[in-house]
Image (cartoon, rainbow, N blue to C red):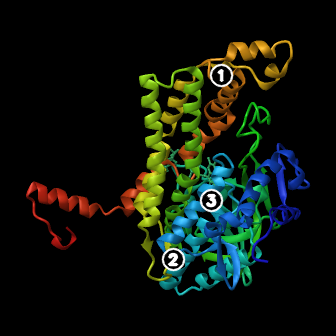
Amino acid sequence: MALRSPQQFIESLRDGREVYVRGQRVADVTRHPYLRIGIETAAVDYRVAQDPQCGSFAVVEEDGEPISRFFQAPRTPDDLLKRRELIEHGSRLCCGFPPFAKEGGGDALNAVLVASRHADKGCETNYHARALEYRRYLYKNDLSVAIAMTDVKGDRALRPGQQPDPDHYLHIVEERPDGIVVRGAKAHLTTGPYTNEILVLPTRNMTAEERHYAVCFAVPANAPGLKMVCKEEPYENRNPFDYPVSARYDMIEALVIFDDVFVPRERVFLSGEHEYATHFVEMFANYHRVTAATYKYPYLELMVGAALLMAEANGTARVGHVRDKIAWLVLYAETVAALTRSACLNPTQDPDTGMVYPDPVTSNAVKYYFADNYHAAIKAVQDIAGGIVVTGPAEEDYRNPSIGPLVEKYLRGSSKVSGEARLRTIRLVKDLTASALSGFWEVTTLHAEGSLAAERLAVLASGDLERYRSQARRAAGLGVPDAGRT
Ligand SMILES: Cc1cc2nc3c(=O)[nH]c(=O)nc-3n(C[C@H](O)[C@H](O)[C@H](O)COP(=O)(O)OP(=O)(O)OC[C@H]3O[C@@H](n4cnc5c(N)ncnc54)[C@H](O)[C@@H]3O)c2cc1C
């Protein structure tokens, strides 16, 4: 079985996993109305893989069978570009939500494949062979996989080894001949409640004293001792007229608690080699920040389109400041798209595995640029739309026979646009910029896939600062110590 149907994916989630929503244990996640929306969104990854029109970018062949592109170990810029196309397509189908059945997990898998090889070289371990075998297991069974990296972290001013509660970073509490036992919790696990597999990475650098925190492994989502506490359902209602995006799609995160979970040896990809913890983190970021900006581009398309529709409905489409804002929105969206393409077109090739990863500086630059400008984009769309976005009526008012015709009459703006069309546009703008959904994206944009500070640090770590320095030295007449680099 190399490609599963959406239905097979959904059925595989009935496995006794321990998931909680608002204090209640969920007996069957596939029948829970809130989780079901996230599950249907994730299932889009499976639908796309079966769509013949998407075959060129969604599916590759391995062992003579079609497998998901997400499990391909990329070796060329084209591999990265096709993967990018797949992520963008899935997100466009879900109005800016990535299905995320495999997107983040695939990034983590690639990172583990590269970083485990380097750990083996430095420490004479055999993690890479295990990672290869795990990859084979994922694609042979077409499993969904989530990435659990972010520890709960306790007091942010203290290192993992200094925390009053040692469990505030996930760590190894017992070594056994056949595996390890881990304890701790990872926050914000996207799709965790409805994924098959959870791939766990360290979240930061570790010292020699913290080596039991330097751990990378994979477990099934129903592993004994693993408990997931879902975020509260944030939405006002799930009516697609009133909330055209958030009523239909979702991405649900959970706090995932590892209450002494046993991990068999063959699923452990780092276990104590503290000097490689950062390498796993950085390699994941190289892949994942391009994924992040890629899946967000369709949401930007929606924002530009909603601003255009709103300006047309209001009769302001030709007003100077409105046109300026729309031009800025287009520049913003297309710069994001171009940078993700550029990161894939100019990858770095890892000499030990032959795998490629997106250019680290551009990868971090695009995630940073996207996040740094997002709130300004929201402001531009809100400005164009007007206050009606937060004061306007709902579908029930429009459908009420005694008041509906008056709503139609008084909600008309431009004579070319009906009251209903303007109301639908208002509701779309509300959903995108002034709802629980938009609040979710504002925070997600800043923090998910790494906060702004993380991207700045990554750019300083991976950028060729010496090249800039040399140019300045030459311009200033200071001489260039390493002329070969200029
Ligand atoms: C919707 C969503 C989905 C996510 N999905 C996943 C997922 O699937 N898997 C996963 O592993 N993670 C996931 N994340 C987590 C994401 O990567 C983190 O939110 C991000 O790394 C920031 O960590 P934090 O939320 O713990 O914030 P914090 O670490 O609490 O940071 C808050 C602020 O404090 C600053 N700060 C923190 N510590 C320090 C310090 N020591 N020195 C200076 N400044 C500091 C940060 O820069 C930031 O400005 C998700 C997040 C969101 C919002």
Query: Residue 14 versus residue 231: which sits nearer the camera?
Result: 14
Q: Quadrant of the C terminus?
A: bottom left
How far apart are the alpha carbons under marks 3 and 1? 41 Å
Question: In x, y percent, where is residue 456?
Answer: 41, 52
List x then y, in percent, for residue 15: 87, 65
The amino acid type found where label 3 is placed reads Tyr
- Considering every residue shown, the one lying at the far left of the view is 477
Residue 370 appears in view: yes
Q: Residue 170: tell me if it is visible.
A: no
Looking at the image, tell me whether mark 3 or mark 2 is earlier in sequence order.
Answer: 2
Find the distance from the CA under tag 2 to the CA under tag 1.
49 Å
Q: Looking at mark 3, is its residue's CB closer than 8 Å to ligand 1?
A: no
Residue found farthest to the front = 416
Q: Residue at x 55, y 32 (%)?
A: 308
According to the picture, the residue beneath numbered tag 3 turns out to be: 169
Q: Is mark 2 within 8 Å of ligand 1?
A: no
Are there few (<14), some (14-19), or many (20+) residues within 10 Å of tag 3? many
Which amino acid, mark 1?
Answer: Val
Rendered image: mark on residue 390? 1
Q: Are marks 2 and 1 in contact (CB under 8 Å)?
A: no
Location of residue 13 by image quarter: bottom right
| Residue 65, image x, y percentages | 71, 81
Q: Viewed as shown, does residue 24 lie left or right of 355?
A: right
Whether the residues at callouts 3 and 1 have beta carbons within 8 Å, the answer is no
Residue at mark 2? 75
Instruction: Say if mark 3 contacts mark 2, CB within 8 Å.
Output: no
Q: Residues within 10 Å of mark 1 (few under 14, many from 20)?
A: some
